[in-house]
Amino acid sequence: MEKSETVNNVKDFLCVELTLQKSDIDMEASINLDLGVDGDDARELLHKYESMFNVDLSDFVFEEYFGPEASFNPFSWLLNLLPGKVKQNKFKKLLVKDFVEGAIRGKL
């Protein structure tokens, strides 16, 4: 399979799974940070990705990229509204291009 075909297949997959338009998916977009996938949704997405593209995820460390399923905490939400509060993200970015390269190599 050619790279351009893999790019289209991965983008089509993400469109269906995340209910997005293809134009919304940039190769440099972060699946976890830009597209907002986290927690159980991320686990489900990765499982489907693994099956659809026959990708080995045995060395993929989920916790480096995704947090637990989010739950609403009003105190955390209020703290984020404070002036000067800088959001720090402790997770690595998982880019759309990483999904494409993983599909080509068969390993993420």
Image: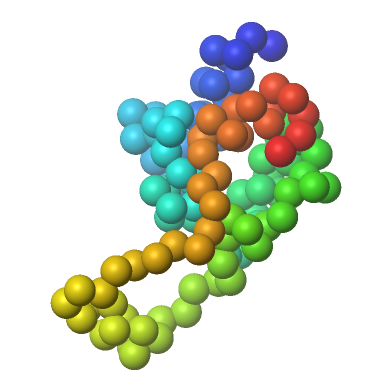
Question: Which residue shows up at 60% across the image and 13% down it?
Answer: 3
Q: Is residue 67 above or below residue 103?
A: below
Q: Is residue 41 visible?
A: no
Q: Is residue 96 visible?
A: yes
- Residue, far top: 2
Q: Is residue 45 above or below residue 38?
A: above
As drawn, is 13 to the left or to the right of 49? left
- Residue, far left: 83
Question: Picture coordinates of residue 102 (x, y %)?
Answer: 68, 31
Q: Quadrant of residue 73?
A: bottom left
Question: Which residue shows up at 73% across the image and 49% down it?
Answer: 60
- Residue, far bottom: 75
Q: Is residue 11 above or below residue 36?
A: above
| Colour logic | rainbow
Q: Nearer the viewer, residue 85 or 6?
A: 85
Q: Nearer the viewer, residue 104 or 93?
A: 93
Question: Picture coordinates of residue 57 (x, y %)?
Answer: 77, 45
Question: Picture coordinates of residue 80 (x, y %)?
Answer: 28, 77
Question: Which residue shows up at 34% across the image and 67% down it?
Answer: 87
Looking at the image, how many numbered discs can be counted on the residues? Answer: 0
As drawn, is 107 to the left or to the right of 35? right
Q: In the picture, which quadrant includes the C terminus?
A: top right
Q: In the picture, which quadrant includes the N terminus?
A: top right
Question: Which residue shows up at 34% across the image and 90% down it?
Answer: 75
Question: Picture coordinates of residue 67 (x, y %)?
Answer: 56, 67
Q: Is residue 93 above or below residue 67?
A: above
